[in-house]
Amino acid sequence: MNAPATKDWMIFIPYRIRDGADADGYDDWLRKIDNPFFNAIPGIKCYTNWKVLGSRHPVPFTHFDFLEIDDVEQLEKVWFKPDLNDFRTEWVRLWGRGVPDPDNAHGFLCRSASHGGPAQAGLVLSQGRSAASSDAAQWATQELLHKHYAVGPSESWRTKEMTPAAAPFAQFAVRYMPRSLDAVDLGAATWGADNAFSATLIAAPDGFVGNGR
């Protein structure tokens, strides 16, 4: 099941937070605690946190993370790092909706199909392959990663079988925008409006383009 090592791998992690988490300071927690923690883990190239802003049709999650990894061969070592598992347990306690949670069941191990423009403060993510913009990065999902970490490493934590809920993200395109409002306008208007949603950057490591909005 292992794929060749490359720098062009990312885990797309969509999820819902519990009701009231925004008002309880979730964004600040991401900036001060979550984002620095993940970006300090060896094997993680870049980790960013995003919030869904709008779409023509309902999106089955409120937030998502992009977790770029240095080497896909090290995925299991990173995914089941003991202190990372402890951190996830605390996230569920503070911000989650309990376990199991069908809306938070999987992450997507994705491989780059084409590179787009530089990362910025907002983005539009369009389901399916998009040729609408030359500066849209194209991603193809290779596997689903089970997010209920109590099972530990096993054959079942990675699968190539796409669930009906995951199937729309078998391929997707990401176009970054200078401002969050630009992404909202674009997602609502011309670029993949029927199958796209806009998002705003919440937290990113130092040096991430667009970090200072």
Image: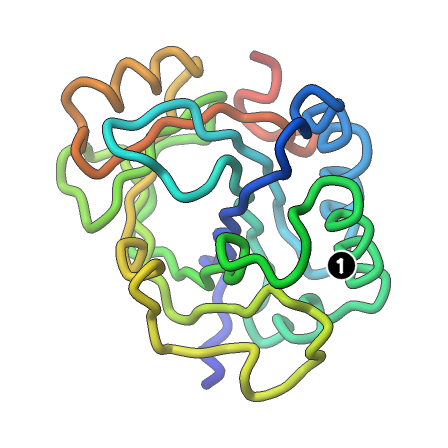
**Residue drawn at point x = 32 percent, y = 43 percent:** 137
Of residue 74 and residue 195, the one placed in the foreground of this image is 195
Q: Is residue 129 left or right of residue 17?
A: left
The number of numbered discs placed on residues in the rendered structure image is 1
Quadrant the N terminus occupies = bottom left
Label 1 SS: loop
**Residue drawn at point x = 66 percent, y = 27 percent:** 20
Q: Is residue 3 left or right of residue 31?
A: left
List x then y, in percent, for residue 201.
54, 26
List x then y, in percent, for residue 39.
72, 45
Q: In this rendering, is residue 174 above or below 202?
A: below
**Residue drawn at point x = 36 percent, y = 27 percent:** 198
Of residue 164 and residue 162, the one placed in the foreground of this image is 164
Q: Residues within 10 Å of mark 1 (few under 14, many from 20)?
A: few
Q: Is residue 133 left or right of residue 13?
A: left
List x then y, in percent, for residue 132.
14, 34
List x then y, in percent, for residue 36.
78, 38
**Residue located beneath label 1 in the image:** 42
Q: In this rendering, is residue 11 above or below 6?
A: above
**Residue drawn at point x = 49 percent, y = 47 percent:** 14
Q: In this rendering, is residue 112 above or below 212?
A: below
Which picture quadrant has residue 86? bottom right
Type of colouring:
rainbow
Of residue 168 and residue 121, the one placed in the foreground of this image is 168
Which picture quadrant has residue 213? top right
